[in-house]
Image: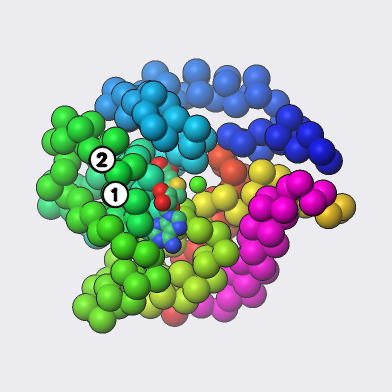
Amino acid sequence: MSNLRENLSDKHVLQSDALHQYILETSVYPREHKLLKQLRDATAESDYKALTGMIVPAEEGQLISMLVKITDAKRTLEVGVFTGFSLLTAALALPKDGQVTAIDIDRKAYEVGLPFIRKAGVEHKINFIQSDATSALDEILNKVEEFDLIFVDADKPNYIKYHETSIKLVKIGGVIGYDNTLWYGTVALTVELAKEHEYMREVGKSVKELNSYLASDARVEISQVPIGDGLTLCRRFK
Ligand code: SAH
Ligand code: CA
């Protein structure tokens, strides 16, 4: 498993790159908002270029946009913004009076995407909080705010903790999405990753713990969507 990166794509868990490309070219790129494309391209040319792969792939953005609309969301929460691709996606999908609260420890990354968010005319829908997610979520909890939709895409080892807060923050009938729940496909590996892949191995363990935790959580129904790097949707029903 020494050549992990060569064997596992960081963009999708599909059979082939060609299939991913087919989906993008047929169904996604022709409909993608030009400012979303510009934001992604600007990230790839910024100081954060090495991390561009952290952005959800465009087909997942399309699903997030649809989720916002089919849940008729007015208030959403995002944990893990980076340069704002998924955030801009949500802000574009929200109604005029919609609000997205967005938490990230790194404001500089957010500022890479901010000009595109402004150009899209949706900055007024965004409440960006620069903070560690745990403290920001605890603070929001004290305000007794309720969200229709929550998207969690930050530090995976804390996801179970974020779930416990998110479940209180999302309304009954609302949806929480956890990103990267297939962790580059490694969750199904039958052998342990080699020492040089310690980060991948350790985060992978957390992701597997999360997946088991969610699977046995009686407060939600779940759907593990094999899009991007895996997106687990949880609908709170009690
Ligand atoms: N959702 C974004 C990508 C997010 S990448 C998109 O698809 O476009 C993950 C982000 O989580 C990074 O920007 C990182 O700064 C943030 N992050 C990691 N740990 C965090 C923490 N403990 N608190 C807040 N943000 C955190
Ligand atoms: Ca992600």
Residue 107: give its label: 1
SS type, badge 2: helix
Determine whether label 1 and label 2 are within 8 Å by CB. yes
How far, Cα to Cα, is label 1 from label 2? 6 Å
Q: Is residue 64 visible?
A: no
Q: Position of residue 148 (x, y in %)?
A: 31, 63
The image shows residue 97, relative to residue 174, as above or below, that is above
Residue 218 among magenta residues: yes
Q: Which residues are magenta?
A: 193-219
Residue 58: give its label: none
Residue drawn at the location 31% of the way across and 62% of the way down: 131
Within 10 Å of the Cα at label 1, are there few (<14), some (14-19), or many (20+) other Cα atoms? Answer: some
- The front one of 38 and 224 is 38
- Residue 227 in which image quadrant: top right
- Residue 172 in which image quadrant: bottom left
Q: Report whether 24 appears left or right of 149.
A: right
The image shows residue 81, relative to residue 32, as above or below, that is below
Quadrant where the C terminus sits is bottom left
Q: Report whether 117 appears left or right of 233.
A: left
* Residue most extreme to the right: 191
The disc labelled 1 sits on which kind of residue?
A: Arg
SS type, badge 1: helix
- How many numbered circles does the render carry? 2
The image shows residue 95, relative to residue 150, as above or below, that is above
- The front one of 230 and 26 is 230
The disc labelled 2 sits on which kind of residue?
A: Glu
Q: Report whether 202 appears left or right of 143.
A: right
Q: Predominant secondary structure in magenta? A: helix
Quadrant where the N terminus sits is top right
Residue 111: give its label: 2
Residue drawn at the location 73% of the way across and 30% of the way down: 6
Q: Position of residue 175 (x, y in %)?
A: 41, 62
